[in-house]
Amino acid sequence: MEQLESEVLPLPLRFRFRDLLLGDQSFQNDDRVQVEFYVNENTFKEQLKLFFIKNQRSSLRIRVFNFSLKLLTCLLYIIRVVTDNPVQGASHGAGQQNAPNGNIKCIDCQWNGSVQDREINWELIFWVDRKVPVWAIQVIVAIISFLETMLLMYLSYKGNIWEQTFQVSFLLEMINTVPFIITIFWPSIRNIFIPVFLNCWLAKCALENMINDVHRAIQRTNSAMFNQVLILICTLLCLVFTGTCGIQHLERAGKNLSLFNAFYFCIVTFSTVGFGDVTPRIWPSQLLVVIMICVALVVLPLQFEELIYLWMERQKSGGNYSRHRAQTEKHVVLCVSALKIDLLMDFLNEFYAHPRLQDYYVVILCPSEMDLQVRRVLQIPLWSQRVIYLQGSVLKDQDLLRAKMDDAEACFILSSRNEVDRMAADHQTILRAWAVKDFAPNCPLYVQILKPENKFHVKFADHVVCEEEFKYAMLALNCVCPATSTLVTLLVHTSRGREGQQSPEQWQRMYGCCSGNEVYHIRLGDSKFFGEYNGKSFTYASFHAHKKYGVCLIGIKREENKSILLNPGPRHIMAATDTCYYINITKEENSAFIFNQEERKGRPAAGIFDGPSQLPVHSIIASMGTVAMDLQNTSPPDSSVGKLVPPSVNGTGSRRPSIAPVQELADSSSILPCDLLADQSEDDSVFTDEKDQSSAEYVKGYPPNSPYIGSSPTLCHLLAEKAPFCCLRLDQGCRHNSFEDAKAYGFKNKLIIVSAETAGNGLYNFIVPLRAYYRPRKELNPIVLLLDNPPDNHFLEAISCFPMVYYMAGTIDNLDSLLQCGIIYADNLVVVDKESTMSAEEDYMADAKTIVNVQTMFRLFPSLSIITELTHPSNMRFMQFRAKDCYSLALSKLEKKERDKGSNLAFMFRLPFAAGRVFSISMLDTLLYQSFVKDYMILIARLLLGLDTTPGSGYLCAMKVNEEDLWISTYGRLFQKLCSSSAEIPIGIYRTESHIFSSSESQVSVSVDDCEDTKDKGDEARSNDQSDHPLLRKKSMQWARRLSKRSGKWQGVSRDSSRDHSQRIAQQRLNLYRRSEREELSELVRNRMRHLGLPTSGYEDLTNLTASDVMNRVNLGYLQDEQNDHQNTLSYVLINPSPDTRLELNDIVYLIRSDPLAHVPDDPPVHSSSLKEMHESGLDTREDTQL
């Protein structure tokens, strides 16, 4: 083949073309094809088309020139009309000055005669008086316009000459140009009338084309509204100008109206006023008026309809944010999939809560149309001047340009958490973040993501909040530190601490005042709060700053290190370049210091910070955003009185050891050992049985399998060997063990049950904080995952390394599932909001199933602490609902009052929220919004929740105040005690106190023992009247009636047996009457347990709970109203209370404990070490530390 190709030469092109025409087969078999490309742009026609049509700039110049010519012709027509002499023009048309005089007189008579006697002089209509200069200019313009029209017609010719010939614009050009050209060769018709004023319509078309070219040249896309307004205005002007010129010309043969009178007549007519003082007198002008009115009635409504439609579309899309405003004003962009009123108000209230953001504008970019509620809110003057709604997609550069994203100060991208497919919602968020980063790489990004496995896709963003990470970590800490969700929610909300100050109840005033505490930062060298503690230890600075100013120093950041350290411990020495993070009502810059008279007279101003104060600061006066602090006498205390004297014990003279002072510099001997790597709990307990010996197999290390990319490594308690997947199933035995229920495992600690729909990767963040290395081993609670859908092997692989973590399939609305997973042995039940119920036809009904199921569990297991996640925060008022409870109604009114005052925390007084029983992840949206002003808030929240473990940074924990601790007396003394002994920083109190609820409904609860003991109390029972039990259940009464009717069938028996039966029936009837709802529920639970083969000995009902048991269950918000005395408990959080706050029994104190690894001896300093290095260095001593 190669030889054949080398011998045969290709045929010339002419032969190939001929063979192709003749159908030669030899050409078809030739596989070599020569392709030639022809470009026609080199032809003269294409070059002209490129210049006149295709090229934007040159075509724009041509259109501007054409528009100018049309305006010039209209101006020349007006000049001709002003200089016109009708008699002179008619004489020129009658025969060049040879017309008889009688004809002229007749014309004069027509001007002065009546309408009936007048005849139309058509010569005045067809002939005009055109001056030679005007004629010459009009001829030149006509020639230019004619040549341009013919050239454009030739260039735009597409094969149909008739279509182009009969176009309106072409016909108008011919009418206004060809007669002028003819007058050059036929001078006698030089004064013939030519309707040059019709060129206004050609000028209108030229203007529209010119504007379109301008928009195309400058890439302006939102010009439809402008074009339509321009078309409407031009149409009105052309109609008025055409009518004015036409009527004026026709009335030359009638009333001879002036141009101004004709214009006045057109305006009066088109405005439908019609004064009647100026009217056309001859029928041609009257016919023209009729035609113009008909044209206006057809054209103008169409134009107005198009304009209104575009206006409505513009209102929906929101227009754009002008470039001038973007360059002179500051704005942020909020990108959402669907804008709900709750999300909008949360964002606006939190964003504009900061004084320096008052001049910012918020541009909302949303692909959906604005709903009615959002539209009403944005019409409020408070928001209408600062919020701009744009309908568009973030994925379109045009819409990003409309929002001026490249000039924005920040861009917030929020996910749609109400979507059924949350993974798809995350994918949309990721694409939006990518689009914004591609369009405006310098714009700071604040991204909210739902699933933790998608977080690494947006790690380039400046701030990222993963919803499931925070949610599960917060719910986990709620089980070991009660109301952590409430604590964090209050910290990340902007408040001034004025909520509830008008309430008559003390707890609401304290709770509302302390809710105003937030986290702030300041450089130590610039601070009055902490500047005097330069060179002192961190715990010394924290204690004395709280004692003196009432602020709580919780963390620092070194200048050379970007990591924030919470409570770095007493070994950290404060430096002037450190950034201090503290909790206070307001930031230091807004604080005014008020000194007492003694200090003003006796001591210089420079010495007010020398030494700690003796009296606590508790008088805080908030006014106009400024906190005035009354500084007490700050002279150093007497050296002889170095300790606080505790009260005597049992009336004797013996005294407990006093509280040691906080050392300025760290002293290793004064600090309690905090090396949790050795786990002192192992030494405290002696393992005697086999079950306890299994716990000795635990080790400390990093989880080997992370379920997603981006999870922070945390040192945890782990199993020495991974548990087989079959051993993770709680309700099924396997070849390794035969346990089939929680009772068989014999757990020493109470269970923590988590009810979720699926085993998502977020559940990993629930387990890690509860298995962290700083949790004492003897306090680890077994974790049971109650899942609607079985987990996959990937998730089981991640949790198989953790001790005492199990799962089972079931739902919370199934009592059998709850009993099998060991709910009677549980201390906490966490109900996670299900993804499938987040979307409902009515938005707020998404929580209906969860609320009813939780309410049922409250009835079945009143001693159980249930922590519930809801989709909508407003639904928390239905938790632990009582229909006729006066106290709940009072709280509802208080919430409405706080909302009317503009509070961002109106829901805070709801008892379930205050007690940490209910939580909504939407309440944490403010964490992302606050990061715009406080860029450290996300990191601090992650450190508090245990999501991040920075080497040297402390962690959140809690301690309970027992009777032995009440001698400390006040919160300030407790602060000193903790700082001096264990270097722990308290940040708040979780208080549970008794409260008498004045409820209008009551129930009588009778113990089971009283119901069973019938022989000794039969007579007393018979004497009881039915009115003593006002809320007897109808079902019990029906059963009693049935039993009483059946007793009639036994009349035929002997008298003794009849008497026995009647007594038995009467006793049964009495038992049913006296049976309460609580007992029926208890019996139902016991019957199901017997049916499942579970022991009933561990089940506790309300009748077995004493008052001390209730008070000891601090996690329990308040019980149902089954108790006779109506004495219930309520719980609430006090963030950074004043130092003189009295401690009460069962108070739980929130602590930030220093990192135990930071105090391990012979290790490098905290700020230069890492957990990884410690882990590697500790491998050699695994047998001692079990690391």
Image: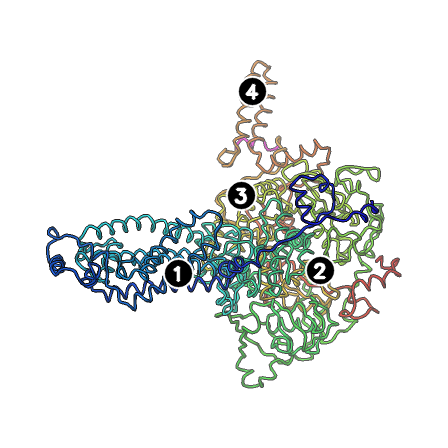
1165, 1080: nearer the viewer: 1165
Neighbours of disc 1 within 10 Å: few (<14), some (14-19), many (20+) = many
Neighbours of disc 2 within 10 Å: few (<14), some (14-19), many (20+) = some
Q: Please, what secondary structure does the residue beneath circle 2 have?
A: loop
Q: Which disc number belongs to residue 845?
A: 3
Give the number of the mark in front: 1 or 3.
1
Mark 2–mark 4 distance (CA, rounded to whole Å): 72 Å
Neighbours of disc 3 within 10 Å: few (<14), some (14-19), many (20+) = some
Whichever of labels 1 and 2 marks the residue nearer the N terminus, that label is 1
Q: Which residue is mark 2?
A: 948
Which amino acid, mark 2?
A: Asp
Q: Which residue is mark 1?
A: 145
Mark 4–mark 1 distance (CA, rounded to whole Å): 117 Å
Q: Can see residue 954?
A: yes
Neighbours of disc 4 within 10 Å: few (<14), some (14-19), many (20+) = some
Which amino acid, mark 1?
A: Ser
Q: Which disc number belongs to residue 772?
A: none
